[in-house]
Image: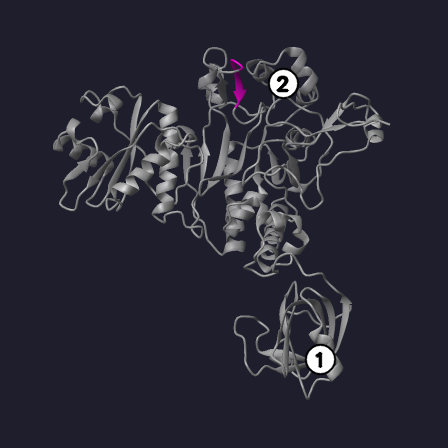
């Protein structure tokens, strides 16, 4: 090694030692007779001190010519530091160097390599290799590493076997758009990059590998946002000879292991919420349960009182923002504007304040008596100082809008603390959802999800009422994992494909290999996949998964550092049998 120690390990016990350090020049402070250099590597910072009259003049001159991010090798003696720095682990010592070797000079970086940098997102993405030198980014990747290590530790100890599945697979019509890869050796035919290893892990269950996992790259060609990337990582798991309860218990223990080892937090038994109750009380299948503010339906209390907005509405529903009666008219107008934004879609907002004397003042007083308003307060369990916020309209749209308002109020009232975690299971999802555009059912999870055994009899007459043997894990309003008990019977799988609008020929072409495998002794099986990037961002207190990916794409799906995607030559296109109008051919 070119060094004897790292820049983060020297302590008072090392005073008097001759050491060799290597690293990057973080900053240089020249006070004339004294010169200090902060030398940084992945492990920390060590201060170098040079002083006129003690340090050789040539070495002082050399040190003064060093620039930020120069890579250097330093030989010197460890001494006790006179002015200690309690903010860093090496703050009790410093190095008096007698030799500095420049291993590589550096151009002036385009932004400060500091925790608080002056570089914007676009600039730091372009120079991501420099951004990765910053402590905050490095700590994110160190957290990711620890979580990956603990994931493997837990699953290995529970008899799961890690198996790699193919990356070049067949394109399928369900789910998000595939990334496709042309085959040079099979003209006109294409591979797809996997959106998940779903069918392969089911085939592994048929093969007798009764506990499988993989920390696997997946690919989806979909619109991007903070918690999406074109390529992302899943903790993908499958088990044989299990029921839903077995899966929930096994992976409740897994998530508890991660919280214990990574965050030092002990989780109790996770609550369970049916999909129907999640939608009724929170307007979302991934509710943030760090705070209460559950929905209260008001139809029986507000109808037929002459207020047309409520009288004509399919649903009148509200929340109790406890302690928020102090909100001013300006703040209430801001909330009204918020719910009327196009992406939320409410037509207006009704409010009622519960005053300190117990009286209630609402924005619709002329339609409702004091006794009516007291009934509202009773329904909400409201106390003096509370603020009732109410929306009305079409049922599903109104619940969706109130969910957004609930989250906004949770944010405004400081109830969404990133250091508080509230995990739960959401269960009993609908198996199918109707799509008005295509006039057919789509699988709410995927077409391999098994119906609840007690609902199979509805498959011919009331398919929309069938509940799925499916489950999601939700933490702080984020779906971090989801899975299901799978269909393992060919006949039931064929029925499912028919419900989803597949012809027999289409089903056979796309998934014949899987249905054929079911005829060779497929065991009952089920599994789950966790979004590993999402878990990392949640544990790290960030809203964006990009902060926990070494080389992420931007919001347009581009890697601006290497400039990808990019065009390829006409010769390559010819080899792949692809013709493009705007690309010249040789």
Quadrant of the rendering where the C terminus is positioned: top right
Can residue 526 be seen at all in this image of the molecule?
Answer: yes
Write the start and end of the magenta stretch as one range: 438-443
Quadrant of the rendering where the N terminus is positioned: bottom right
**Is 309 on the left-hand or right-hand side of 240?**
left
Q: Which mark identifies residue 60?
A: 1
> Which of pointers 2 and 1 indicates the residue nearer the eye?
1
* Residue 42: image location, x then y, percent: 65, 62
Element type at mark 1: helix
Task: Give the residue drawn at x 62%, y 40%.
Answer: 232
Element type at mark 2: helix
Q: In this view, does 97 lie above or below 272?
A: below
Q: In this view, does 586 lie above or below 250?
A: above
* Residue 394: image location, x then y, percent: 35, 22
Which quarter of the picture shows residue 192? top right
Mark 1: few/some/many CA within 10 Å (<14, 14-19, 20+)? some
Mark 2: few/some/many CA within 10 Å (<14, 14-19, 20+)? some
Q: Name the residue under label 2.
A: 490
Task: Give the residue drawn at x 59%, y 73%.
Answer: 90
Can residue 294 be seen at all in this image of the molecule?
Answer: no
560 and 402: which is toward the camera: 560
Q: Which mark identifies residue 145?
A: none
100 and 430: which is toward the camera: 100
- Residue 193 sits inside the magenta stretch: no
**Is 281 on the left-hand or right-hand side of 28?**
left
Task: Give the residue drawn at x 58%, y 61%.
Answer: 114
Q: Main secondary structure of the magenta part?
A: strand
Q: How far apart are marks 2 and 1 (CA)?
A: 79 Å
500 and 107: which is toward the camera: 107
* Residue 89: image location, x then y, percent: 57, 71
């Amino acid at each position: 090694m070119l060094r004897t120690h790292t820049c983060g390990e020297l302590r008072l016990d090392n005073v008097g030692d001759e050491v060799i350090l290597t690293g990057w020049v973080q900053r240089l402070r020249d006070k004339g007779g004294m010169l200090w250099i902060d030398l940084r590597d992945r492990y920390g910072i060590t201060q170098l001190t040079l002083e006129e009259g003690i340090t050789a003049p040539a070495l002082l001159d050399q040190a003064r010519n060093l620039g930020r991010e120069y890579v250097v090798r330093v030989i010197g003696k460890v001494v006790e530091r006179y002015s200690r720095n309690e903010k860093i682990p090496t703050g009790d010592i410093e190095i008096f160097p007698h030799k500095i070797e420049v291993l590589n000079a550096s151009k002036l970086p385009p932004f400060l390599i500091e925790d608080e940098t002056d570089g914007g997102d676009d600039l730091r993405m372009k120079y991501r290799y420099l951004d990765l030198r910053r402590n905050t980014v490095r700590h994110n990747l160190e957290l990711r590493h620890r979580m990956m290590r603990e994931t493997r530790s837990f699953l290995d100890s529970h008899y799961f076997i890690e198996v790699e599945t193919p990356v070049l697979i067949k394109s399928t019509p369900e789910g998000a758009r595939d990334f496709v890869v042309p085959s040079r050796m099979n003209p006109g035919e294409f591979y797809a990059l996997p959106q998940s290893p779903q069918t392969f892990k089911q085939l592994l269950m048929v093969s007798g590998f009764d506990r499988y996992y993989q920390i696997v790259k997946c690919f989806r060609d979909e619109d991007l946002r903070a918690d999406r990337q074109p390529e992302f990582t899943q903790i993908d798991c499958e088990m044989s000879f299990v029921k839903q309860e077995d899966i929930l218990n096994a992976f409740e223990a897994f998530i508890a292991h991660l919280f214990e080892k990574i965050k030092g937090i002990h989780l109790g038994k996770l609550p369970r919420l049916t999909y129907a109750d999640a939608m009724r009380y929170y307007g979302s299948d991934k509710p943030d349960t760090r705070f209460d503010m559950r929905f209260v339906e008001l139809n029986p209390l507000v109808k037929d009182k002459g207020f047309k907005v409520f009288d004509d509405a399919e649903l009148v529903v509200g929340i109790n923002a406890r302690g928020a009666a102090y909100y001013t008219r300006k703040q209430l107008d801001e909330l009204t504007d918020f719910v009327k934004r196009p992406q939320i879609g409410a037509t207006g907002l009704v409010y009622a304040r519960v005053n300190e004397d117990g009286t209630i003042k609402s924005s619709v007083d002329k339609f409702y008596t004091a006794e009516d308003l007291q009934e509202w307060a009773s329904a909400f369990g409201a106390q003096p100082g509370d603020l009732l916020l109410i929306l009305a309209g079409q049922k599903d749209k109104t619940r969706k809008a109130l969910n957004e308002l609930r989250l906004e109020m949770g944010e405004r009232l400081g109830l969404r603390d990133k250091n508080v975690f509230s995990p739960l299971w959401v269960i009993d999802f609908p198996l199918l959802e109707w799509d008005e555009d295509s006039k057919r059912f789509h699988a709410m999870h995927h077409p391999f999800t098994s119906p609840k055994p007690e609902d199979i009899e509805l498959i011919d007459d009331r398919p929309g009422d069938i509940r799925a043997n499916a489950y999601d894990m939700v933490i702080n309003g984020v779906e971090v994992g989801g899975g299901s008990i799978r269909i393992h019977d060919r006949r039931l799988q064929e029925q499912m494909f028919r419900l989803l609008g597949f012809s027999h020929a289409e089903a056979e072409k796309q998934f014949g290999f899987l249905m054929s495998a079911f005829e060779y002794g497929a065991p009952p099986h089920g599994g789950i996949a966790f979004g590993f990037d999402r878990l990392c961002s949640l544990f790290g207190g960030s809203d964006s998964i990009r902060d926990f990916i070494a080389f992420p794409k931007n919001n347009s799906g581009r890697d601006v550092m290497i400039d990808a995607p990019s065009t390829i030559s006409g010769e390559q296109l010819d080899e792949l049998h692809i013709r493009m109008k705007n690309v010249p051919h040789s």
